[in-house]
Amino acid sequence: MGATTNAEVGAAPRFHLHPEVEAMPRERLAALQAERLRATVRNAYANVPLHRTRLDAAGVKPEDIRAAADVRLLPFTLKTDLRDHYPFGMFARPRGELARLHASSGTTGRPTVVGYTAADIDAWADLMARSLAAAGARRGDVVHNAYGYGLFTGGLGAHYGAERLGAVVVPMSGGATERQIALIVDFGARVLCATPSYALAIAEVAEQQGVDLRNSALEVGLFGAEPWSEAMRREIEARLGLRAVDIYGLSEIMGPGVACECECQAGLHGWEDHFLFEVIDPETGAPVPEGDAGELVITTLTKEALPMLRYRTRDVTKVTTAACDCGRTHLRILRITGRNDDMLIIRGVNVYPSQVEAVLVGLPDIAPHYQLVVERRGSLDHVTVEVEACAGLPHDAYVPVARAVAHHIKSLIGITADVVVKHPGEIPRSQGKAVRVRDLRPKPG
Ligand code: DLL
């Protein structure tokens, strides 16, 4: 298993679950988008007062939408719009016509609440099944689902998708890591769904227990819900003996399965028959040229209960429409570097936690667990990078290792950071989304 199996899977013929849409010529995809965009704007205009007011102010009527590019006529929607219209003010269907609600707690104030009709849940299951298949999952596979079940969209999103694919789902949720490992082995899971940080925590506990998951049936992992680096991908692949695939989504738009990597692992196919993707300059709102970094903006094309017009995700990425070796025609979102709001500015240098991760993972003597502590010293922001010693590293090596790590960070990212080496196990492990930044700066206002 392990590396050999990965090679075999990589050589397998590229399987498309929905071949007629996944390989649709881009001109036909654009025509489908135009038609669905018009219907979405019609739904939003007729049923959501906020959208109607904004569209009227912009002088745009649903009939004005003739091409996919006309999305640029539409006003943006922000996360604060959902909060301001808590709980159901942005829904285009009355409560009695909904099949499900999800919510995310957020760090401040009211949660963000999202709703789905039965048809929305059905489309989501299809897209998650398509994503699982693109990653290499197949009918009959045992899918161990360690995404949290509950208001978070990860657990139920992956669950319905795996069932739709015809896989056998183990609805494990996060936590009870030792039990997870036993069940992965005993049930012969071929597919693992988890956040990348939790996947690493599973690998670590397995190693401590003397269980070599590289010898298990695991071959494919769908990891997402938080930013992670290529270095982290290699680390997880080496320690779990599987192909680690990146999966993206957000509850405001649907949940997991908005975009997913295929077996080529060369960027996440954004499913353009259901969503319209743009990348904009966050300052001006203007589109950036293809391949340039900017903020991802997503418009839903089929959602009934919660149509979203040009939702500002705050996620920073690049996209490409270049052909992929898998034969899918849908554009690829390159790895999400981080969120606008997670970006730190250290002495004028913009830094995302995932960039620090890329430097840390794979360095000798330290384990791939870390946290950034940000403080205000005088008028400047200062960052301390807390890393963890590998088991067995002698104490008198901690200071020289810290110095070496600081040197790598300075030379590769260009920032000066204090580095503190903690004892093995001292950095908190996540069961879901990892907390990468402890921000001790005074809150504005
Ligand atoms: O995290 C949905 C999800 C569940 C995606 C399971 C993938 C797997 P939210 O809790 O609403 O939804 O958080 C969405 O998480 O705007 C990104 O900032 C971040 N995020 C999600 N996937 C990725 C990824 C789920 N692959 C927010 N890479 C998004 C980087 C990601 N960031």
Image: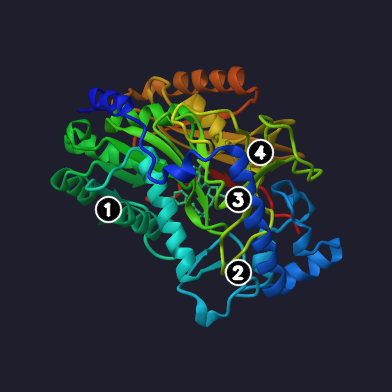
Q: How far apart are marks 1 and 4 (CA)?
A: 43 Å
> For this rendering, which residue is in front, 424 or 76?
76
Q: Mark 1 points at which residue?
A: 166
Report helix, strand or loop for mark 3. helix
Query: Is the shortest distance between ligand 1 and the CB of mark 2 under 8 Å?
Result: no
Marked residue nearer the N-terminal end (1 or 3): 3
Q: In this view, does 291 lie above or below 376?
A: above
Percent position (x, y) of residue 390?
Answer: 34, 27
Q: Name the residue under label 2.
A: 110
Q: Residues within 10 Å of mark 2 (few under 14, many from 20)?
A: some
Report helix, strand or loop for mark 4. strand
Percent position (x, y) of residue 277?
Answer: 63, 45
Q: Distance between the residues labelled 1 and 2?
A: 37 Å
Q: Distance between the residues labelled 4 and 2?
A: 25 Å
Q: Distance between the residues labelled 1 and 3?
A: 28 Å
The total number of labels drawn is 4
Percent position (x, y) of residue 16?
Answer: 39, 40
> What amino acid is found at the position of numbered circle 1 in the picture?
Gly
Q: Residues within 10 Å of mark 3 (few under 14, many from 20)?
A: some
Q: How crowded is mark 4: few (under 14 residues within 10 Å), some or many (20 or more)?
A: some
Marked residue nearer the N-terminal end (4 or 3): 3
Marked residue nearer the N-terminal end (1 or 4): 1
Nearer to us of marks 1 and 4 is 1
